[in-house]
Image: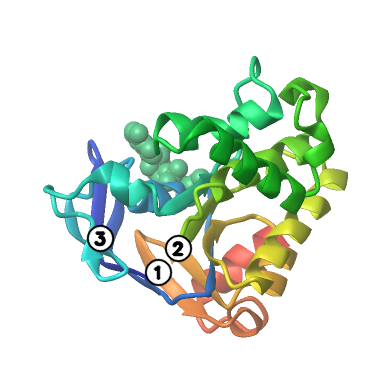
Amino acid sequence: MLQLEGVRKSFGDTEVLRGLDLTVREGQVVVLIGASGSGKSTLLRCVNLLEVVDDGRITLEGEDVTDPRVDADAVRARMGVVFQAYNLFPHLTVLENTTLAPVRVHKVPKAEARERAMAMLERVGLAEKASARPDDLSGGQQQRVAIARALVNQPRLMLLDEVTSALDPELVGEVLDLLRELKDEGMTMVLNTHEIGFARQVADTVCFLHGGVVHEEGPPEQVLGDPREERTRRFLSRVH
Ligand code: ADP
Ligand code: MG
């Protein structure tokens, strides 16, 4: 589904990604962990073409998306992205937020976009909030709307950047439950999280980022339960 080979990315003198390799198979959930500043968000932004890589290659379903001739909008249309801050438009209703991209970007007829959006709001359990404004929802509900909005374009791959870290602890569960359901439905996902417990439950593969590369990678029970690398061990002892 997704392959990163030798990806390099610097900001000024700071080399954030230093030849990073990563493979994500269809239906797999890959969880990125690592210290703050280790490049987790940068990695997702490179995959979504929000950042241009300095070197290396990113392949999505066999297509080299780092080729400068690629149609970036067409590539982005195949991915659903959810960030830490829900980024909903406060002046639009939940339904309008969810139909905006299909109508404006993907030129889906309004009635069809509405139908798809309602189906996705139903999917995340918020159909009855369709005409509410984001401010009238809890943080967890807002994040579920953001996930519905990302799903409405039927992405092949979901990228989720710390989607629970802005939430009050009691609201984290409902978002994690939704992600777990998406996994069970076969959605391919790459996500960053501080929730080590969640990573353990949902990940097929955990990748520990350190020094601009994937320093250790493996099934959650191994990387989180019995890390081979000293650096991984040290990181986990700090976050646990
Ligand atoms: P993480 O998500 O793992 O906390 P980030 O990918 O956000 O890490 O950041 C990695 C490093 O890159 C940090 O040192 C950060 O300050 C730097 N960085 C990220 N984005 C930019 C940017 N647009 N301009 C300059 N520096 C950036
Ligand atoms: Mg980050």
The mark lying in front, picked from 3 and 1, is 3
Label 1 SS: strand
What is the quadrant of the N terminus in the image? bottom left
**Which residue ends up furthest to the right in the rendered image?**
170
Q: Is residue 193 left or right of residue 14?
A: right
Q: Residue at x 31, y 51 (%)?
A: 75
**143 up-or-down from 236: above or below:** above
Label 2 SS: strand
Amino acid of disc 1: Val
Q: x, y percentage for residue 177?
A: 78, 60
Mark on residue 7?
Answer: 3
Q: Establish whether ligand 1 lies closer than 8 Å to the Cβ of label 2.
A: yes
**64 up-or-down from 141: above or below:** below
| Dot 2 or dot 3, earlier in sequence | 3
How many angstroms separate mark 1 from mark 2 (CA)? 5 Å
Mark on residue 209?
Answer: 2
Q: Is residue 39 visible?
A: no
Q: Which residue is mark 1?
A: 214
Report if the CB atoms under discs 2 and 3 are less than 8 Å apart: no
Q: x, y percentage for residue 85?
A: 61, 34
What is the quadrant of the C terminus in the image? bottom right
| Dot 3 or dot 1, earlier in sequence | 3
Q: Residue at x 43, y 77 (%)?
A: 25
Label 3 SS: strand
**Circle 2: is it few (<14), some (14-19), or many (20+) Cα within 10 Å?**
many
**Circle 1: is it few (<14), some (14-19), or many (20+) Cα within 10 Å?**
many
Using the image as rendered, state which of residue 114 and residue 146 is in the foreground: 114
How many angstroms separate mark 3 from mark 1 (CA)? 11 Å
Report if the CB atoms under discs 1 and 2 are less than 8 Å apart: yes
